[in-house]
Image: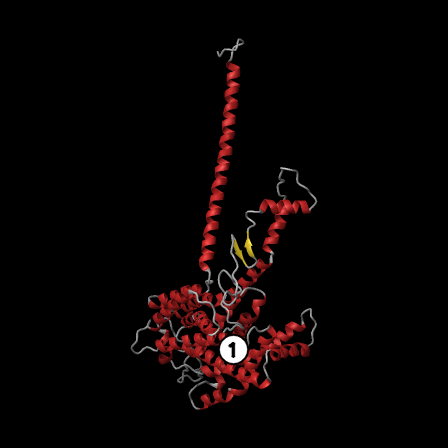
Amino acid sequence: MSKESSGGDIPTIFNPKGAAGAGRQRAPSVLITDEGANSALFAHADSLGSQQEAAGEPLAAGATRPATLATKIRSCSAGFCSESARKIYFGIWVTICVTASWVGATHCIKYLYLRRPFDEDADDPVFVPHDTSDVNMTLVRTRYSASYQAPFFTTWFVTNWTMLFFPLYLLSRITSRNCQSASEIFSESIRDFRDKGFTMGRFMVRCSLFCLLWVGTNYMYIMSLRILLATDVMALFATNVSFVYLLSWVILHEQFVGIRIMAVIICDTGVALLAYMDGITGSPTLGGVVLATSSAAGSAVYKVLFKKVIGDATYGQVALFFSLVGMLNAALLWPLSLGLILTGVETLSWDRLPWLALLVASLLSLVANLLGNFSVALTYDLFITLGLITAVPVSAALDVVLYGAQFEGMKLAGMILIAVGFFLVMFPSNWPDYITRLLRNIILLSHSARWSRRSRSGNSSSSRRDHVDYRTGYIRSHLRSPSGRVR
């Protein structure tokens, strides 16, 4: 379930490619884009003149020619179809897709725990619906005898689908214009790891350790859904960006940024409010919050260790690595899953196994992970990360509609604090410079707009004065006598 990325950099708001560890800072201007400063607002006349001269229409000295409709259309299309604009358009779609897949997978797994209770008195036992509109969802598992209580089996089944990473990558490379064979693509991915000094035994040991970390992180995430609402779990998991920064600061020696430390404190405060939102006595909420927060911390450890151990990986390396993790999970952990079921620790009914919900959750989780790792080729990391926090309000709307959940008091305050901390973590290290330059440009634009209004008002007043002088002269010329005196 965890939506991982191949690096440990933190994408920031003003520098979407990731400001952490970049080693350089770009100076912003009027419009802060990835290409740098965009000062077209102040150089429109020059650029227009250069376009006309390039088109073979020299301008007369001291004269400016108004832009034609075709020129305006070309300039607008060039602005809308630039590389940065295309990345932003793709980024919006990626954020929507990540949000939809993340919410869908989480709610499908939550639905597994809310399976209808078994009616033993009926002649033909079926699953009958139960009303959860007035039920505290944190106590559902104690009030209803759910037919599916197998979080580890769910984790094992969902993780198996990561084996499709490299086949899908292979298919995309074969169908591209490069026309490489499957053996060449596989050899290229293996060669990249060999060039970094990995032997076969060392590489498989690393994959096994990451497999255990991956399964443990996802198991805690899925286990917490037995106790908490899907929205609560997703909000808590969004705190992983703060854990990524702390671990990057300690392990990867990233730059210390005070506002990000403040963001970590705000996120921790939100977690504390969610932990005690249902009180302390007799409530399993605290255990669910601990599990979800541990899952967020495990996801951060996975990302930072991947960056530390593997380094900057290519798409082929990432695809091969995830496929190996899925194969190791399928080959090594099935005895543990079977043992938990046979010993009664996990319960499920094989004849009534909810295959549809499992398959949908696995497919949506695969889509979320594919977007989280490979959509960086089309857009900025920022839009991928935003999918974590935008999924929270979407999931809250579903919880309100489906289960009649209420978000108020400490729960609402905790989610708001986590969202604020999430956005503060993505602030760049030199954020005061960006704010100062942005305010300076806003002031300059306001001054230029004010002077343009004054010039227009001055021109209109002078034209009115000339008109009055003309009328006065006309009247005086008609009132004069032939001798020159005024009548």
Look at mark 1 in the image and give the residue it sits on. Answer: 356
In the displayed structure image, the side of residue 204 where residue 440 appears, left or right: left
Residue 34 position (above or below residue 224): above
Q: Nearer the viewer, residue 402 or 295?
A: 295
Q: Nearer the viewer, residue 443 or 344?
A: 443
The answer to whether any part of residue 407 appears in the image is: no
| Residue 164, percent from left and from top | 58, 78
| Residue 411, percent from left and from top | 36, 68
The residue tagged with tag 1: helix, strand or loop? helix
Q: Nearer the viewer, residue 87 or 128?
A: 87
Label 1 environment density (alpha carbons within 10 Å; few <14, some 14–19, many ≥20)? few
Exactly how many numbered labels are in the figure? 1
Examine the image and state in which quarter residue 482 appears: top right
Residue in view at x 36 percent, y 66 percent: 412
Q: How is the image coloured?
A: secondary structure
Residue 320 position (above or below residue 421): below
Residue in view at x 56 percent, y 62 percent: 90
Residue most extreme to the left = 281
The answer to whether any part of residue 155 appears in the image is: yes
In the displayed structure image, the side of residue 88 where residue 275 appears, left or right: left
| Residue 444, percent from left and from top | 48, 47
| Residue 466, percent from left and from top | 52, 26
Q: Nearer the viewer, residue 431 or 340?
A: 431
The kind of residue tagged 1 is Leu
